[in-house]
Amino acid sequence: MAAFSQSSFAQTATPPKAELAEKTDAKAAEPKMQKVEVQGTRNYDERRQDTATKIVVTQEDIVRYGDTTVSEVLKRLPGVTIGGVQGRGGDIRMRGLGAGYTQVMLNGEPSPPGFSLDSLSPDLIERIEVIRAATAELSTQSIAGTINIVLKKSVQTAQKELKLGMFEDGGKFGENINYQVSDKAGRMSYSISGNLNHGKYERPSYSDEVRMDANGNSLVNTHTYNLGWGTFSNVGFSPRINWNFENGDTLTTQSFVNASRFDGYSSNVRTPEFGAVPDDLKDRLRPIYASDFQKIHSDFSMLRTNLNWIRKLADSAKLDLKLGVNYNKRNSDVGFAGYNQNNAQILDRQSISGATDKGLTMSGKYSAPFVQDHSFVFGWDGAYSKRSETRTQKDNVSFAANALEGLKAKPLDENFNADVTRLALFAQDEWNVTKQWSIYGGLRWEGIDTRSSGSFKSSGLNYDNTPYSIHNKSSVWSPILQTLYKLPNSKNDQVRLGITRTYKAPDASRLIPRRFYSNDNSASNPDTQGNPNLKPELAWGLDVAYEHYLPGGGMLSASVFLRKIEDITRTILVKEMDGTKEVFVSMPANDGQATTRGIELEAKFPLRAMMEGAPAIDFRANLSFNWSSLSSVPGPNNRLDSQTPISANLGIDYKMDKIPLTVGGNASFQSGGPVNISAVQSSYSVPKRVLDVYALWKFDPKTNLRVSLGNLLHQDNISASSYTGTSGSVQTNITPTTVTARVMFEHKF
């Protein structure tokens, strides 16, 4: 244990296989170094031996189902759920919590603004770390937990790998290519990975909205049919170069380049089922378009690169320094056309927006075993980012039909700039008290300074055109304690305990008081606006787990968690006057306290390890129960952030003995149900059930053919929302889903 104590608590520290590789590289020939790397990886189980709790998902598990997006991979992990429509990605949630409660990191650093994990090919990933309890070295903006995506970097053997794939979704086809080459040249090793993904989509959806008067009587029922279609393309490139010096130092540079393009179209046709909109309702709402057409063109590009120097010092001490830069750019061109009930055009709107993010990161840590059986680490973590954003909107309302509609042009001209500075200092120690008992203690201070300014100009809206300047500053102390105890007289049973202080800082976009205009303003489709007075949410957390390890790499575990959150951020709905009309506006606000708790169960084992002569079948299963309540929202069903109450996965892999074929499947479940958002708002969603299957045929050790079917149940996604104020409304949304088929040919050279 002492040999690995330094890496066991540092989530992004050099893993044991790299420690062994560096020593061997300095004094041995190349083939021996490769052999030691592989052996070190096999002998060390991070989940079992690290004091800080962490689940590690290997590259083999990541590519098993041939997924083209990271969210499809994550949905099968214990305690992880995906929001939105099944099979299409969405916000990533741990313990059922999204909206910033789950921290997503890329190579141990917070993912850059505007970056979507679904633009990252799973083939570029070396492993995924699911970190349930916070550590001092990583940012403690992780109330629910942290998911760390680690890009490929290890070079075990010189090889080239090519993957060619095709996929079909709802009758629309796409293709993807992945390529990787890795090799060594003396003390230098390198790895280059790249991917190209292109596809089309077509997705219909339906909604019904009933609007009511103050007495709850139905006034009008509107049925809306939406059809969205378009194309998407994505290219990614990730080179890594590593130098091992004679004195044991290492210097590594790793970059990630990503570019994507999206061209989408959507049309809405609204049909009144009964009734007509009364005059008093018309006075409060903006015009309801009988139909509309929207087209979107969007380009996104990102560059992220870092330099990492590891200096070996005397007495097994080490200095680890990192310097990184990142650059993101997004441009969008949106056209919107609105039509009245006579199918005459009454609005032609053009909206052009752009955003640029520039950032610099710098971190370092010094680690040394000052005292026997202790591993101390001291370090810092700093980042600076600058965001510039512009948006212009031009309206053409010079149509003959507007003589009766009375519409006015609402041109917009927005400029927004934000500077975010983050600095953190931390110290941590892992103490091997005995062979059975280890303790991890850490303390982190993290401060965030956000300065933003902008201007909003409009001649058609009743908004303040005065330029604004916002300064928001916050800091948090985060003490952390984790312990691992291996039960006496047992090599396979152990318990864990973690006590953490975490937080959730408001992002810059939610601090800005600018208004985003809704085309059809209602309680279910309001304007949105930020709040410059937001404070961080602070949480105390408790994690307890019991783990029992089985032969052949199997394990059983049961864990419970509790979070007490202060100054919870909740989206509130208010009414404001826009000229002579009343409109709905939603905005974030700190409002009360919340408590969330849950139970997570996990099991995985090979059947042959349990029964002699059994088929080569591997089982995987996990089950999670989550509960939460908000003090500011009346119950029942006052769950936090639409928390998923129950989630489960059951997976089976069967490797046949007589033929080189492996087949498997995974069934996942996410419960829904009613949620009280406020005293006058509520929502409801039906459970989501997803079944995925795959087959892998090995022609030889270097050539594979992988076939997979996703979302075989193709269950409709159904949700509803209601508002019971002075003018009530109920809206139901139905989105059909489709089966996805994928074929991937894989060959290593």
Image (tube, helix red, strand yellow):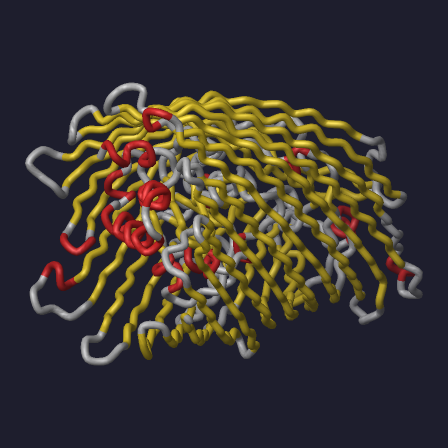
Q: Position of residue 398 (x, y in %)?
A: 93, 61
Q: Residue at x 42, y 69 (%)?
A: 710
Please indicate, yes or no, whether residue 258 appears anywhere in the rendered image.
yes
Q: Residue at x 65, y 36 (%)?
A: 385
**Among the 4 quarters of the image, the one containing residue 386:** top right
Please indicate, yes or no, whether residue 630 appears anywhere in the rendered image.
no
For the residue pair 694 and 150, the one nearer the viewer reads as 150
Numbered disc total: 0
Vertical position of residue 276 compared to residue 175: above or below: above
Q: Position of residue 656 (x, y in %)?
A: 22, 75
Q: Residue at x 23, y 71 (%)?
A: 655
Q: Position of residue 437 (x, y in %)?
A: 19, 29
Q: Residue at x 41, y 35 (%)?
A: 247
Left or right: 416 in relation to 643: right
For the residue pair 331 and 79, the one nearer the viewer reads as 331
Q: Position of residue 234 (x, y in %)?
A: 60, 63
Quadrant where the image shows the C terminus: bottom left
For the residue pair 318 and 735, the one nearer the viewer reads as 318
Vertical position of residue 136 compared to residue 744: above or below: above
Quadrant where the image shows the N terminus: top left
For the residue pair 274 and 632, the one nearer the viewer reads as 632
Left or right: 375 in relation to 533: left
Vertical position of residue 563 compared to residue 559: above or below: above
Left or right: 331 in relation to 363: right
**Among the 4 quarters of the image, the one containing residue 22:** top left
**Among the 4 quarters of the image, the one containing residue 111:** top right
